[in-house]
Image (tube, rainbow, N blue to C red):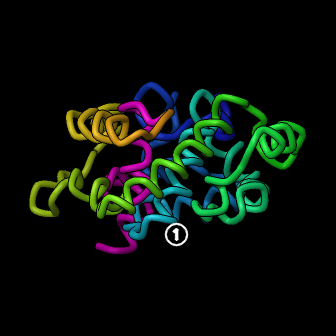
Amino acid sequence: MTSDAVQHPVTAATADGHPAGARCFGDGDPLYERYHDEEWGVPVHGDRALYERMSLEAFQSGLAWITVLRKREGFRAAFADFDPEVVAGYDEHDVERLMADAGIIRNRAKILATIANARALLDLQAAGGSLDAIFWSYATPESERVRPVSFADVPAVTPASTALAKELKKAGFRFVGPTTAYAAMQACGMVDDHLAGCPVVAAIS
């Protein structure tokens, strides 16, 4: 498996011999390295920012994360910088436009889910809730975090991600199962799965 094919989240199943002591993922690709070093595992707050990350994680499902990362600016352009008020108004013409947009991953189910999730977010906010509150209620407290030593210590699904996915589904969100929810939790700093030998860990310790 090449570095481009190392999927996200990083687990024993996706690491496939990635050398210990190197980055958890991304070595050899400047864009991927920058994402790993500067974004992955850094706390993300705010409904719009979390909506973007959740959407990108959903588009990643079944693909290598680098595929999404390379199209990130295309996604931002296609989905109005992930402004939920704008995306919630997308109609069938917008869906067809997006299906013809080579700047994104053209998957109808994921496009429809992104639009539906914008509407779910607006409904949630109208009811006095927030995506930030839902996501961060499932964060692992700092005092309970254990640094993974190897990829075998990094799960693909946890009870917290399963509960998060269930709550999101109840709130009307689509395409965010337990695995995608955990990937979002990793990416947005609700857990910290940088391995003990990762250069990022060495830099902050």
Write down the residue under mark 1: 38
- x%, y% of residue 178? 36, 32
Up-down: is 151 above or below 144?
A: above
Residue at the image point whose x is 65% and y is 29% from the top? 109
Closest to the observer: 184 or 10? Answer: 184
Residue 191 visible: no
Q: Amino acid at mark 1?
A: Glu
Closest to the observer: 71 or 131? Answer: 131
Residue at the image point whose x is 50% and y is 56% from the top? 51
Up-down: is 9 above or below 136?
A: above
Up-down: is 195 above or below 82?
A: above
- x%, y% of residue 21? 43, 51
Residue at the image point whose x is 71% and y is 56% from the top? 79
- x%, y% of residue 155? 31, 33
- x%, y% of residue 169? 37, 35
User: Which quadrant of the figure has residue 99?
Assistant: top right
Up-down: is 27 above or below 83?
A: above
Residue 120 visible: yes
User: Which quadrant of the figure has residue 196?
Assistant: bottom left
Magenta residue span: 176-205
Image position of 131 (left or right of 75): left
Residue at the image point whose x is 63% and y is 61% from the top? 82
Q: Secondary structure at mark 1?
A: helix
User: Is residue 180 shown in magenta?
Assistant: yes
User: Is residue 145 shown in magenta?
Assistant: no
| Number of other residues with Cα within 10 Å of mark 1, as a class: few under 14, some 14 to 19, many 20 or more | few
Point out the image quarter for the N terminus.
Answer: top right
